[in-house]
Image (cartoon, rainbow, N blue to C red):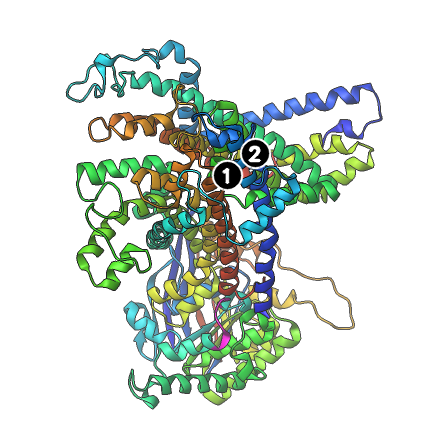
């Protein structure tokens, strides 16, 4: 593996491992890119995702209107290709005259942010607890595992609905609710992997050289587990986004003042017969994003799994 | 049975692999023939070709398989289904994976009886005879299990494959094969996955079946020792072709083809003198990429220049011996 | 022998159920603010005595562990409290709306199996053909699209545009069915009323399909991959060598084995089914537990929410239990 771990204890040893990790990481990343090119569907997913992210970040610049600006003179205008529509409002307007395209673009911000944050926290907490529990076992493992089992007994949406109904709609509440159940999956995954990796020889070797437990966990074992976590995390982002949308749809997620795809679809329900686009397009945007994320995630799984370990 | 000029190919990304090439084989009813060769020499494919069970995308491109005068290659799928299991039966190498893990062993044996309607004549037609037929089939299965030597068949009937030992599983497979009293049994490496002592028992069982039922047997194996023990005649295959054939004793004592000679030489012997093992040099050629006229050319110790271009046919050199080599 | 193991497994779920109840209890108490204030909502002025009376009624004046004990014993007795809004026991409300939800859930399961299994099998048998590629693409879409949107699109296409199916509810207004099982489709058959049957069936199709789509997609994928693996197995070859027809080989020998991992997956999907239930019922105005829960949340009717969440969680646990038990019967090699 890395030469530095076999050297004598001196100052340089602390610097080198990290540099080496960085180099390994970049090498892996390039390798990954090469692989991705061979999976057109995954690449497509990635491209679409990048488009979404870019438009979300650049929302204030590319959205034609202020998403909350109401124009009661232009209510329920259809998209430009339909009769009565115009290029003023490319995708039409909703029941309060707000431009749909702008709202969808801004809605993307919310969804992507929620997805990333919720998954991020889940991974952080779950992976951390999982590593510690899997490596050290003992009381910590027992307690946390039991708690995780209990949380697993709740279907995700039910749990989230329960929590949100108690806390009320709100951005941070939402992230909290999603992360509170989300970490369990990553906990289990990392813990399981940790249990397997623990028995392998390179861990023995590292211990024999006198590396501390924590160092072993983070610099030796982590890179080996990384890819499975990455695949799951990618898929989960999509899942979280769907959950957020479902909750917003029910009125339990993002507060209604902030444009969010789920609440837009809900709002458009009443108008379904007259103005189908209000519900359809936000949902379509959501569906396409989730589809792309899933494509990317599945592609990553194909690429990373047969490789087993990217050293 | 008479196989004439059988040719089975597998299209692969590297080109077409001729797994069985110009295979000619004749067999009298009730004979026991051994088909010997290394892995990948085409023996299993030949067996599968007889029953038209070659896995997709492989296919038979030419030749005839005459079974009691009828060409199996030309038969319709429906007709083949009637022959499989009933006239010609096959047993495979690893009994654990060949038995379906979710069904009881007894039921799996009974299935052969049921689909070929073996007991129907005795019990009468469906649905009135159904119950009697069921019982008759069950009884016959027990009888079969006894015949192949499975202890306590009444109890064992209701057990699952994973509850059987390796040897018993193979016996069960033989029972399945035997159920409809086939005239020919194709045994593809039936003993390879078993312990040596069990091997002997199974071979013994097969011999008994041949004697009592007059069933012809083609035993495929890579173990010359097994073939020598058991078969009346040995057929040697290499790279998809038959290279030699003859009565067992003759082939063992007077091998004609250089490959056969090499095989016999490379068998480790338990004798007092210690000798170095003599393997055949080189490796089995890539069937998609045959370089020479004679596939054995590059490993042959008796190779001659004319090997590279002379016509190679399976020639009768008398005494029931056939060889495919320029030397004869 | 197996029976004992099954019993053990059943008993093991009890601590989990208790744990669930405890968690729910904690959540409710963890809500910031005085529960009584929450209950009163933004409503008018309530006198101190009335608030005190409410507190007593909900046992809020007692210490926490006593509250927990009371909560648990009440739940065990089936007393889930009373709805703020409607002043009736929560249990009654749930029982009233349960048949509708069960009908929907069963419909979704039936749909998922009827669509998912054949698609998966055919895709595997005709690997890489057009059918295979289309099905796999379709199933991928099925697992990506969120329930609520799928439902709305379904309504748009089938109800609004094509006018084949109704938009919501269980029956056309004005019709009613005598309550036998509560499952309209079955009741109407039992009553011999074909018109009612047709009507209720039509109303059931779209919601079931929407709820079951994701599960169907999952089933199709798992069936396909396990069938592919199984078709490669030796015993399939043997079945053919026995002279079985291709149909028999696939259906009898291969399918049984392929069902095993599928059942597990379906078990895991029940969570999705339960969660999606609320959303689908809301979209289609289906008068089941889910819709009631959503309405209760808006109305801040917490006892109902609490009771329903517990019910959902329990159902999930029991569903997993059933899947485990089913699994042992399908796979003779495994004992619980």
Say whether residue C40 is left or right of residue A224. Answer: left
Residue found 43% across the figure and 63% down from its top: C256
Residue found 44% across the figure and 37% down from its top: C301
**Residue for badge 2:** A180
User: Callout 2: few (<14), some (14-19), or many (20+) C-alpha neighbours within 10 Å?
Assistant: some
- Quarter of the picture containing the C terminus of chain A is top right
Disc assigned to residue A243 = none
Q: Chain of mark 1?
A: A
> Magenta stretch: dominant SS?
loop
Q: Chain of mark 2?
A: A
- Residue range in magenta is B100-106
**Residue for badge 1:** A159
| Camera-nearest residue between C257 and A9 | C257
Q: Is residue C153 visible?
A: yes
Is A295 magenta? The answer is no
User: Mark 1 near mark 2, Cβ–Cβ under 8 Å?
Assistant: yes
| Camera-nearest residue between A221 and C156 | C156
> Residue B134 at x, y = what percent?
39, 83
User: Does A200 appear above or below B259?
Assistant: above
Q: Going by the picture, which residue comes out furthest to the top?
A: A61
Residue found 50% across the figure and 77% down from its top: B174
Say whether residue A192 is left or right of residue A236. Answer: right
User: Does B49 appear above or below C263?
Assistant: below
Say whether residue B108 is left or right of residue C198. Answer: right
């Amino acid at each position: 593996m890395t030469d530095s771990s076999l050297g004598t204890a001196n100052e340089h040893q602390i610097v080198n491992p990290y540099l080496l990790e960085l180099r390994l990481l970049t090498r892996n990343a390039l390798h990954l890119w090469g692989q991705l090119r061979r999976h057109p569907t995954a690449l497509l997913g990635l491209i679409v995702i990048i488009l979404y992210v870019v438009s979300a970040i650049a929302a204030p610049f590319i959205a034609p209107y202020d998403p909350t600006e109401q124009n009661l003179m232009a209510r329920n205008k259809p998209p430009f290709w339909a009769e009565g529509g115009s290029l003023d409002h490319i995708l039409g307007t909703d029941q309060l005259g707000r431009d749909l395209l702008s709202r969808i673009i801004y809605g993307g911000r919310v969804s992507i942010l929620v997805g990333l944050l919720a998954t991020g926290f889940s991974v952080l907490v779950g992976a951390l607890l999982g590593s510690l529990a899997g490596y050290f076992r003992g009381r910590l493992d027992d307690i946390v595992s039991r708690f995780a089992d209990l949380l697993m007994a709740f279907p995700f949406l039910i749990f989230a609905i329960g929590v949100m109904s108690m806390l009320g709609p709100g951005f941070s509440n939402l992230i909290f609710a999603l992360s509170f159940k989300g970490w369990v999956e990553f906990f289990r995954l990392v813990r399981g992997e940790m249990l397997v990796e623990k028995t392998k020889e390179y861990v023995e070797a590292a211990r024999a050289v006198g590396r501390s437990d924590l160092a072993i966990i983070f610099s030796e074992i982590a890179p080996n587990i990384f890819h499975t976590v990455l695949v799951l995390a990618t898929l989960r982002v999509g899942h979280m986004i769907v959950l957020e949308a479902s909750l917003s749809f029910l009125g339990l997620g993002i507060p209604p003042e902030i444009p969010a795809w789920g609440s837009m679809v809900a709002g458009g329900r009443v108008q379904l017969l007259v103005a189908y686009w209000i519900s359809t397009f936000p949902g379509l945007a959501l569906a396409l994003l989730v589809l792309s994320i899933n494509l990317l995630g599945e592609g990553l799984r194909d690429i990373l799994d047969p490789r087993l370990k990217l050293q | 049975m008479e196989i004439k000029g059988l040719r089975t190919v597998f299209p692969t990304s590297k080109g077409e692999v001729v797994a069985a090439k110009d295979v000619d084989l004749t067999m009298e009813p009730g004979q026991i023939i051994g088909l010997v060769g290394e892995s990948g020499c085409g023996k299993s494919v030949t067996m599968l070709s007889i029953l038209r069970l070659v896995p997709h995308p492989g296919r038979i491109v030419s030749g005839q398989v005459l079974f009691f005068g009828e060409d199996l290659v030309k038969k319709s799928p429906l007709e083949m289904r009637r022959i499989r299991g009933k006239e010609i039966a096959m047993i495979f190498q690893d009994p654990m994976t060949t038995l379906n893990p979710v069904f009881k062993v007894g039921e799996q044996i009974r299935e052969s009886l049921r689909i070929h309607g073996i007991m129907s004549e005795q019990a009468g037609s469906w649905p009135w005879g159904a119950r009697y037929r069921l019982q008759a089939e069950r009884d016959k299965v027990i009888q079969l299990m006894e015949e192949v030597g499975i202890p306590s068949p009444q109890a064992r009937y209701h057990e699952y494959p994973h509850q059987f030992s390796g040897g018993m599983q193979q016996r069960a497979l033989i029972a399945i094969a035997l159920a409809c009293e086939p005239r020919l049994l194709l045994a593809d490496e039936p003993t390879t996955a078993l312990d040596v002592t069990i091997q002997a028992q199974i071979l013994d069982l097969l011999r008994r079946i041949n004697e009592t039922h007059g069933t012809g047997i083609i035993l495929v194996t890579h173990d010359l020792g097994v073939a020598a023990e058991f078969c009346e005649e040995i057929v040697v295959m290499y790279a998809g072709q038959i290279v030699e054939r003859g009565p067992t004793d003759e082939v063992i004592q007077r091998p004609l083809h250089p490959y056969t000679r090499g095989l016999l030489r490379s068998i480790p012997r338990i004798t007092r003198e210690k000798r170095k093992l003599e393997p055949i040099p080189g490796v089995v050629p890539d069937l998609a990429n045959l370089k020479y006229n004679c596939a054995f050319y590059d490993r042959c110790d008796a190779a001659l220049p004319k090997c590279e271009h002379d016509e190679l046919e399976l020639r009768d050199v008398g005494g029931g011996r056939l060889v495919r080599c320029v030397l004869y | 022998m197996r029976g004992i193991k099954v019993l053990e497994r059943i008993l093991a779920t009890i601590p989990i159920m208790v744990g669930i109840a405890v968690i729910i209890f904690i959540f409710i108490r963890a809500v910031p603010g005085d529960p009584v204030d929450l209950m009163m909502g933004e409503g008018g002025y309530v006198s101190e005595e009335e608030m005190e009376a409410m507190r007593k009624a909900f046992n809020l004046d007692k210490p926490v562990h006593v509250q927990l004990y009371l909560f648990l014993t009440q739940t065990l007795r089936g007393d889930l409290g009373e709805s703020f809004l409607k002043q009736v026991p929560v249990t009654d409300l749930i029982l009233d709306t349960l048949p509708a939800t069960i009908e929907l859930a069963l419909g979704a399961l039936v749909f998922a199996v009827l669509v998912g299994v054949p698609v998966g099998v055919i895709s595997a048998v005709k690997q890489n053909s057009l059918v295979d590629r289309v099905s796999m693409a379709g199933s991928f879409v099925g697992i990506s699209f969120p329930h609520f949107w799928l439902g709305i699109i379904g309504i748009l296409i089938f109800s609004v545009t094509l006018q084949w199916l109704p938009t919501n509810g269980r029956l056309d207004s004005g019709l009613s069915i005598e309550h036998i099982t509560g499952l309209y489709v079955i009741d109407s058959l039992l009553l011999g009323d074909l018109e009612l049957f047709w009507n209720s069936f039509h109303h059931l199709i779209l919601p079931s399909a929407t709820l079951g789509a994701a599960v169907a997609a999952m089933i199709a994928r798992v069936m396909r991959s396990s069938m592919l693996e199984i078709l490669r197995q030796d015993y399939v070859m043997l079945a053919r060598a026995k002279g079985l027809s291709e149909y028999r080989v696939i259906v009898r020998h291969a399918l049984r084995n392929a069902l095993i991992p599928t059942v597990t997956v379906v078990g895991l999907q029940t969570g999705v089914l339960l969660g999606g239930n609320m959303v689908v019922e809301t979209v289609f105005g289906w008068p089941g537990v889910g819709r009631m829960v959503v309405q209760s949340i808006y109305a801040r009717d917490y006892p109902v929410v609490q009771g329903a969440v517990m019910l959902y969680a329990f159902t999930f646990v029991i569903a997993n239990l059933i899947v485990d038990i089913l699994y042992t019967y399908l796979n003779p090699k495994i004992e619980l």
